[in-house]
Image (spheres, grey):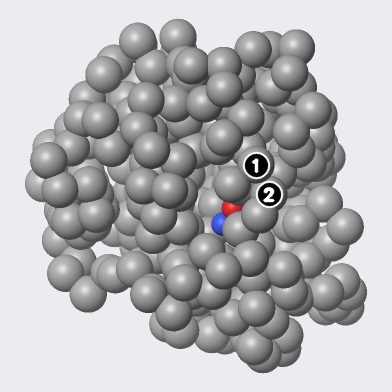
């Protein structure tokens, strides 16, 4: 399959990744697993972690979360500042950097030990104790995070950030630095294909209604100003990250993770999107 685009370089550590990597892994709710390529290699999941942060915050504060962050597609880039001025510091949705920064602020206010509690939550979903942050990636992003500093301070100027921006951003960079393989990612996100319940233990991570809402947000906002295109071509709720990863979910069937580091102009994996388009077209396993 042809490949185009550039590896993310605005976070210096991400630029060191071999662009030729390609991995894919699918996990089904009836316990089948298929993988190919670099599907066991860990990579920086970046914005895919915004879904996990939202899931944790939603569990803690429930629907009150929607007072702090909207549920509308923005039609803007992931790191855009423009709508915050007219929207008085309420980000359009939780998957924009602005939205995820607000979600990080909520978690910081609610958790005793945010860094430890968040990773424990992520590990608990799949019983996988090897999942961890990358200090190297988080530090690399912090050193050049001027835009996120601007976003966080701008939102705080509207009274919509309660903690110190430096603490909110340190936590946000940690979230984004999570490293996982496609195999780990597809297993981790399977609860969203299973009405919010862990497929093995049957324990709810989210209620059925909450799980439906997270999937709706991934469908409408998961790829920023390319969300329409992803729905059009792939037809699954999903979320991308600038590390080149994409997770996509088919409710009641499967979760699929793809990793290919070269990004298109909208900051989403070029080959990852192409692969998923071909996968759902040939298999006829999309939700539409
Ligand atoms: O804040 C940032 O810019 C990164 N930590 C995450 C951005 C990202 O992954 C956008 N997704 N495609």
Tag 1 secondary structure? helix
- Residue at image location 39% in from the left, 17% down from the top: 65
Marks 2 and 1 close (CB-CB < 8 Å): yes
Locate the C terminus and report the quarter of the image it occupies. top right
**In this view of the protein, can residue 250 be seen by the observer?**
no
Badge 1 density bin: few <14, some 14–19, many ≥20, Cα 10 Å? some
Horizontally, residue 17 falls left or right of residue 186, namely right
Q: Identify the disc placed on residue 133.
A: none
Q: Which secondary structure, mark 2? A: helix
Q: Residue at x 63, y 65 (%)?
A: 144
Q: Which residue is label 1 attached to?
A: 150
Quadrant in the rendering for residue 76: top right
Q: Is residue 152 above or below residue 65?
A: below
Q: Nearer the viewer, residue 60 or 124?
A: 60
Q: Quadrant of residue 36?
A: bottom right
Q: Position of residue 161 (x, y in %)?
A: 44, 26
Q: Which mark is residue 147?
A: 2
């Amino acid at each position: 399959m042809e490949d185009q685009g550039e590896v993310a370089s605005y976070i210096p550590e991400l630029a060191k990744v071999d662009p030729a990597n390609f991995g894919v892994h699918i996990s089904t709710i009836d316990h089948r697993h298929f993988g190919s390529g670099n599907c066991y290699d860990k990579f920086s999941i970046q914005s895919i972690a915004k879904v996990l942060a939202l899931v944790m915050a939603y569990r803690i504060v429930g629907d009150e979360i929607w007072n702090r962050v909207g549920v509308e597609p923005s039609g803007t880039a992931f790191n855009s500042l423009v709508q915050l001025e007219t929207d008085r510091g309420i980000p359009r949705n939780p998957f924009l950097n602005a939205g995820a920064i607000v979600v990080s602020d909520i978690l910081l206010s609610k958790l005793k030990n945010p860094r430890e509690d968040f990773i424990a939550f992520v590990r608990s979903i799949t019983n996988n104790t090897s999942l961890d942050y990358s200090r190297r990636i988080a530090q690399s992003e912090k050193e050049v995070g001027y835009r996120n500093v601007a976003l966080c301070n701008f939102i705080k100027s509207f009274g919509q950030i309660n903690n110190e921006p430096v603490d909110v951003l340190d936590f946000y960079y940690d979230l984004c630095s999570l490293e996982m393989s496609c195999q780990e990612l597809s297993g981790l996100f399977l609860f969203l294909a299973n009405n919010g319940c862990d497929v093995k233990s049957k324990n709810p991570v989210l209620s059925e209604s909450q799980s439906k809402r997270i999937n709706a947000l991934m469908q409408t906002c998961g790829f920023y100003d390319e969300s329409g295109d992803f729905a059009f071509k792939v037809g699954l709720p999903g979320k991308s990250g600038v590390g080149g990863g994409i997770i996509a979910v088919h409710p009641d069937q499967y979760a699929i993770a793809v990793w290919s580091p070269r990004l298109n102009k909208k900051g989403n994996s070029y080959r990852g999107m192409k692969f998923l388009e071909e996968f759902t077209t040939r298999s006829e396993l999309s939700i539409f």
